[in-house]
């Protein structure tokens, strides 16, 4: 399965923030949308990503005043992305090796979607279930 197929079944649009938004503003967006990470855009370019883990780390380091810090100080700048034609297996491998759970999907330099570990698990499970059903049918019919 390729990422483009998964994106088609997800609601359009990606939650983003700007580098000047405070971590408090970002936590409100993460909470209201029930998501774990947000892409930071500078104009149309991806400048970074902030996940709930970054916010927890900053609060552990700086206390509650971390929430007044701008996103630019807490985000990961070297964002690993994929394209619509990447496969589910490639994404699983990249997320596992990189130890992160979110990947922006880019097309011609523009952000077109985001894939989370939840999407990966859901579609991987569906693929495995299909294979098991096909094998059972094969064994039953000979
Ligand atoms: P996560 O597991 O997605 O909550 O993120 C764990 C750490 O990896 C955090 O520091 C994130 O900022 C970072 N991170 C998340 N997604 C990516 C990505 N696609 N590329 C690079 N870093 C990421």
Image (cartoon, rainbow, N blue to C red):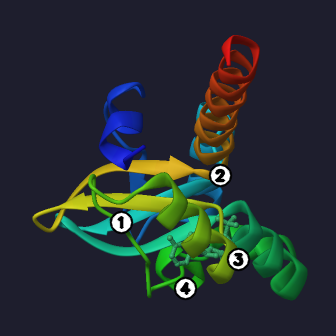
**Residue holding disc 2:** 117
- For label 2, count other residues whose C-alpha is less than 10 Å away and answer few (under 14), some (14-19) or many (20+): some
Query: In the drawing, does residue 37 fall left or right of residue 53?
Result: left
Q: Nearer the viewer, mark 4 or mark 3?
A: 3
Q: Give above or below for 115 relative to 130.
A: below
Q: Nearer the viewer, mark 4 or mark 2?
A: 2
**Which of disc 3 and disc 4 is earlier in sequence?**
4
Q: Residue at x 51, y 56 (%)?
A: 38
> Which type of secondary structure does the marked residue at label 2 adopt?
helix
Q: CA distance from mark 2 to mark 3?
A: 11 Å
Q: CA distance from mark 3 to mark 1?
A: 15 Å
Q: Nearer the viewer, residue 78 or 21?
A: 78
**Which of disc 1 and disc 2 is earlier in sequence?**
1
> Which type of secondary structure does the marked residue at label 4 adopt?
helix
**Residue holding disc 1:** 82
Q: Nearer the viewer, residue 53 or 123?
A: 123
Q: Give above or below for 60 relative to 31.
A: below
Q: Is mark 3 within 8 Å of ligand 1?
A: yes
**Residue holding disc 4:** 73
- For label 1, count other residues whose C-alpha is less than 10 Å away and answer few (under 14), some (14-19) or many (20+): many
**Residue holding disc 3:** 99
**From this viewpoint, which residue is outermost toward the left?**
108
Instruction: Tell me which corner region of the image, top left, top right, bottom left or bottom right, holds residue 125.
Output: top right
Q: Give above or below for 40 relative to 12.
A: below
Residues at marks 4 and 3 touching, judged by CB atoms closer than 8 Å: no
Q: Residue at x 40, y 66 (%)?
A: 40
């Amino acid at each position: 399965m390729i990422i483009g197929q998964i994106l088609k079944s997800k609601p359009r649009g990606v939650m983003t923030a700007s580098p000047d938004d405070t971590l408090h503003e970002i936590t409100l967006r993460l909470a209201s949308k029930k998501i774990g990470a947000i892409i930071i855009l500078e104009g149309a370019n991806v400048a970074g990503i902030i996940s709930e883990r970054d916010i927890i780390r900053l609060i552990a380091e700086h206390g509650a005043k971390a929430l007044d810090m701008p996103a630019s100080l807490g985000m990961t700048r070297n964002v690993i992305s994929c394209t619509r034609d990447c496969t589910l297996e490639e994404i699983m491998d990249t997320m596992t090796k990189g130890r992160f759970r979110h990947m922006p999907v880019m097309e011609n330099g523009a952000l077109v979607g985001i894939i989370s570990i939840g999407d990966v698990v859901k579609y991987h499970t569906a693929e495995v279930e299909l294979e098991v059903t096909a094998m059972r049918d094969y064994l039953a019919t000979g």
